[in-house]
Image (cartoon, rainbow, N blue to C red):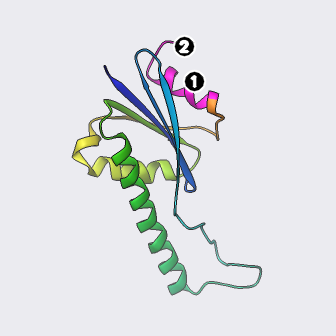
Amino acid sequence: MQTFYGIWVDHAHAFIVKTNKLADMEIDEMKSAVEPHHQGGLHGDERLSMSDQRSHDENRKHQMKAFAKELIKRVEHGDEIVIFGPGTAKHEVKHEFEKNKSVAAKLKGVETTDKLAEHELKAFVKEYFKLPRD
């Protein structure tokens, strides 16, 4: 039986929705180790130097790459995958998926959504893959 995955993702965590044509559904949350983004400063008047900012950005990039690779491990046995979410994290994850031959062809789309409640996550994935509704 075909397995479908929807991954709602931001830089803090991901919700992985697993389903099939019978619309049996499971949702798992995966926390991210990606550091919060510092734009121009830390606390109040503290400022990051250009080299500190570059170092911070480089660390975030590596952390996001590791996060995406862990997501790939969790969904690589699925048949079709959609990535969705509110910000840029979905595009960073998509980039890692496209570099991995085992999942690149399974990636069916990347969609923009707001933060969604559990029932909205399920509804989005069902609608995206045209699965039966409850």
**Residue at (56, 68) in percent of width and height:** 35
Q: Residue furthest right?
A: 44
Residue 9 in sight: no
Looking at the rendering, which quadrant does residue 77 occupy?
Answer: top left
* Residue at x-position 54% and y-position 79%: 53
Q: Secondary structure at mark 2?
A: loop
Can residue 68 be seen? yes
Mark 1 surroundings: few (<14), some (14-19) or many (≥20) residues within 10 A = some
Q: Which residues are magenta?
A: 119-132
For the residue labelled by badge 1, is the local secondary structure a helix, a strand or a loop? Answer: helix
Asked if labels 2 and 1 touch by Cβ distance under 8 angstroms, the answer is yes
Name the residue at 54% across, 13% down: 133
* Apparent side of residue 117 relative to residue 62 in the rendered image (left or right): right
* Position in image of residue 13 (x %, y %): 55, 52
| Residue lying farthest to the left in this orientation | 101
Q: Residue 83 location, x and y as percent?
A: 45, 39
Mark 1 or mark 2: whose residue is earlier in sequence: 1
Amino acid under label 2? Arg
Front residue of 92 and 7: 7
Name the residue: 48% across, 47% down.
Answer: 90
Per the image, the residue denoted by label 1 is 123
Taking 49 as reference, is 63 above or below it? above
Count neighbours of disc 2 (C-alpha within 10 A) and say few if under 14, some if 14 to 19, many if 20 or more.
few
* Residue 131 among magenta residues: yes
Q: Which residue was labeled with disc 2?
A: 133
- In the image, residue 130 lies in the stretch drawn in magenta: yes
